[in-house]
Amino acid sequence: MVALVLLCLFIGLPMAEILTFIEVGGRIGGLATIAATIATAFIGAALFRYQGMHTLARAQSSLEQGHMPLEEVIGGLGLLLAAICLFIPGFVTDVIGFLLFIPALRLVAIGALLRPMMRNAQVRMSARGPGPTAGPFGADGTVIDGDYRDVSEPGDERPALPEDKDANNGTGKGEKS
């Protein structure tokens, strides 16, 4: 499936762009076709800047409120893809780029692209089971017990930790074995 999509992108898209250039150039002329291609790149840059700043402001607002800005991140990814499509010379990619500047279409398209990756990530995470727990426990919940010995050089002073003072009668120094 991935190979078919890549084949369409690397062979089909350039062929569609060439055919579209020939057709548009035959109808409006060569210089007008080139001017239209350059104009779409400038329009794309302006749209990317405007919508990108708006999306960034919404993301910052979400973060300040303590919310994860997932929709804004997905929207920003869509905006980047839209801008790339408009910078690539060609009318087919320009249509795709302009469609991606519509917020509802952008979220649906990027969501459709990310959904298979997220499904694979969820399957891989659930196959591993729960992650390690915090604290003095191993991954399976067992207690790990052990002893330690201070092997630092005699002149190597480290700050005394509260648990060191408790274990050594409040002195904060000494070895435990």
Image (cartoon, grey):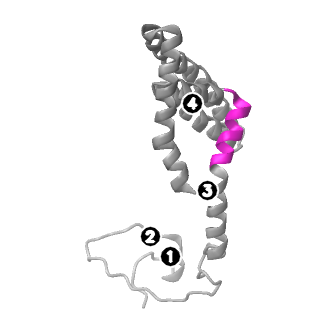
Q: Does the magenta segment cover residue 110?
A: yes
Q: Residue at x 45, y 75 (%)?
A: 172
Q: Earlier in the sequence, mark 1 or mark 4?
A: 4
Query: What amino acid type should be assigned to the residue bearing mark 2?
Result: Ala
Q: Which residue is mark 2?
A: 160
Q: Residue at x 61, y 56 (%)?
A: 117
Q: Does the magenta segment cover residue 15?
A: no
Q: Residue at x 49, y 13 (%)?
A: 26
Q: Residue at x 66, y 68 (%)?
A: 123
Is the Cβ of the residue at disc 1 closer than 8 Å to that at disc 3? no
On-image quarter of the N terminus = bottom right
Instruction: Work out whether 28 lies above or below 15.
Output: above
Is the Cβ of the residue at disc 1 closer than 8 Å to that at disc 2? yes
- Label 2, label 3: how many angstroms apart (C-alpha)? 48 Å
* Numbered disc 4: secondary structure: helix
Query: What amino acid type should be assigned to the residue bearing mark 3?
Result: Met
Q: Which residue is mark 4?
A: 82
Q: Any mark on residue 117, and which?
A: 3
Q: Which residue is mark 1?
A: 165
- Label 1, label 4: how many angstroms apart (C-alpha)? 61 Å
Residue 39 seen in this snapshot: no
All told, the count of numbered labels is: 4
Q: Which residues are magenta?
A: 102-113
